[in-house]
Amino acid sequence: MKILIKDLVLYGYHGVREQEKEQGQDFMFNISIYIRGSGLKNSDSLQHTLSYSDVIREVKKINEGQRFDLLETLSRVTADRIINMSDVVEKVDIRIEKPHPPIDEKLGSVGVEYSVSRMDRQVHRENGETVFISLGSNMGDRKRNIERALEGLERDPRVDIVKTSSLYETGPMYVQDQEDFYNMVALLKVGLDPFSLLGLIKGIEHDMGRKAGEKRYGPRPIDIDILYFGDRRLHSDILEIPHPGIKERKFVLLPLEEVAPGMKMDGMDIKSFIKQKNLPGKIQKVS
């Protein structure tokens, strides 16, 4: 069974050119949603399919809520959102076009096509590398900054967010004269090598306003560190795995114990390690 949404035209502000981001333009969406057939057999219930009204509502929310440089990213985010709406969705094909692109040549439209299947995502989750990252923010809307960083990671189809810790408010550790941080740890499955993941992270930090050359350990809208990348050990000028600061940072250890309670550290479980270290510093669970 296939649900079709044809020629849905929405006004958005996506594109590399400043003109596109400021003035906006029409975007045409064509979406095919493949529904698991067994769920529909002898059934006339909406619970065994997906409402096209709900799908359109989600597409509009993405289109209106974010501005993407690339249609490729918009298509991936939209398709991934749809496939996560219900377990009955097996596959999503999406085509997004600009009917009136800002170029001089005469043509009908330009666009991209993207497909994602539940099987592809399952294989990725089973075969991807297990990665732990920490996220922190102490500027602006700290909670929303961390949410935006996670959304940025999840836009990449090679990154799957498996689990996140609670959100903690923590005092600054190295430079005291600044606002408190919000911190959390996330468990990922990734189909990237460590340096490619680092590049993705640095791009997200830059897009969120973090500038190169700023004061080390100073205030920042977002800070993302790779803690562990499978069982790899890596030492380079720009990346060290495992992260050398893990064992001295309570704001990393407590949320890490939440997402990986069975992890061993110096021959003991992480909870016992935290108790033995008795690290100083303010830390309080927020949500």
Image (tube, rainbow, N blue to C red):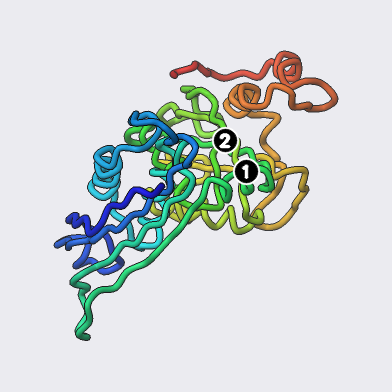
Residue 125 got which mark?
1
Q: Nearer the viewer, residue 55 or 100?
A: 55
Residue farthest along the bottom direction in this orientation: 105
State left or right for residue 272 relative to residue 258. Answer: right
Q: Nearer the viewer, residue 209 or 204?
A: 204
Question: What residue type is disc 2 on?
Answer: Val
State left or right for residue 284 relative to residue 237. Answer: left
Q: Is residue 50 above or below residue 8?
A: above
Q: Is residue 149 visible?
A: no
SS at mark 1 in the image: helix
Q: Residue at x 30, y 42 (%)?
A: 55
SS at mark 2 in the image: strand
Asked which quadrant contains residue 261, the reply is top right
Question: What residue type is disc 1 on?
Answer: Arg
Closer to the N terminus: mark 2 or mark 1?
1
Horizontal and vertical percent position of residue 156: 49, 52
* Real-space CA distance between mark 2 and mark 1, rounded to the nearest whole angstrom: 9 Å
For label 2, the residue is 162
Circles 2 and 1 in contact, beta carbons < 8 Å: yes
State left or right for residue 57 relative to residue 266. Answer: left
Asked which quadrant contains residue 113, the reply is bottom left
Q: Is residue 245 above or below residue 12?
A: above
The mark closer to the camera, 2 or 1, is: 1
Horizontal and vertical percent position of residue 275: 71, 13
